[in-house]
Image (cartoon, rainbow, N blue to C red):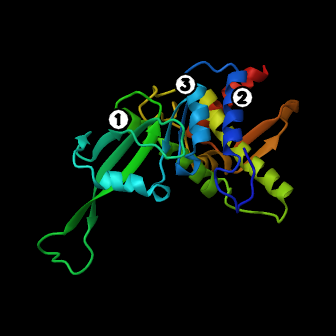
Amino acid sequence: MLHRAGNVHDSNGALDFIRSCFATLLARGFRGRLEARLDGAHFSEATCAWLRDEGIEFSVSVPFERFPELKSLIQQRARWRSIDEEWAWFECDWKPQKWSRGMRCLVYRRRVKTPRKGPIQLDLFEPIERHNEYKVVMTNKRGTPGTVLHFHNGRGSQEGIFAELKSHGSLDYIPTRREIGNRVYMLACVLAHTLGREMQMRATPPSRKTGRTRPCLWVLERLDTLRRAVIQRAGRLTRPQGRLTLTMSTDDALAADFQRLLAPWQNQAA
């Protein structure tokens, strides 16, 4: 985790943080393909060049508002190649003027439908307006545009983790006016969330293979589900014959969940 003030840009100190994360992976003996996907806040030549030079495959969103010439390029484009009924694409040689070296740049167009505002004839039809939404992705991946699109759009699973931490891990709460207190609180929230996932991953084998969007290999219960189903249960800790025992009301399904989650840790302790 990287703690920073709330009034600075998301990219502040991000490159050093990215370097440390990948260095930690390699130091722990990771073997496999290193990948990264970033939003527009991290679009910079320094970040992209470092990832490319380190052999890390990445994709990053290009922020339209910073590059008016890119918007003009898209508006003038007449030929788009189709991925499916929803997405189309073209590839261009564009790069920011201050960059010394460009990379692969893919432009995507998505056909979306929105209900038309204003008076409508409900008995006859529901009027729909169709318009295009655009996305530009810079990458060093050499896969097909559809493969790159699915990989980049897989960032939603990352956002889901942040949303779960906020809504069910109370990470959106600021308990004190001092940085050190907020750091300790944030660390406790993240550790609780990580422990919940680690318990499930140790108790259950992976149920998925690597997919185009890079989903988690395990199907994991959310923290609030674990809290309601397992943690928030009335029980009593006793020591019959000197052995620590958790006593709860009879529930075969709950007992099976407890045994499944705790078995890997008991075996490790033994």
Determine whether the residue tagged by mark 2 lies in a helix, strand or loop.
Answer: helix
- Furthest-right residue in view? 242
Read off the residue under disc 2.
24
Q: Quadrant of residue 246?
A: top right
Determine whether the residue tagged by mark 3 lies in a helix, strand or loop.
Answer: loop
In this view, the residue in front, 149 or 255, is 149
Picture residue at 70% right of the left edge, 63% below the top? 7
Mark 2: amino acid = Thr
Q: Are marks 2 and 3 in contact (CB under 8 Å)?
A: no
Which of the two discs, 1 and 2, sits closer to the camera? Answer: 1
Does residue 267 appear left or right of residue 62 in this picture? right
- C-alpha distance separating marks 3 and 1: 32 Å
Read off the residue under disc 3.
205
Picture residue at 50% right of the left edge, 57% below the top? 66
Determine whether the residue tagged by mark 1 lies in a helix, strand or loop.
Answer: helix
Read off the residue under disc 1.
145
Mark 1: amino acid = Pro
Q: Is residue 183 above or below residue 244?
A: below
Mark 1 surroundings within 10 Å by alpha-carbon count, few (fewer than 14), some (14 through 19), many (20 or more): many
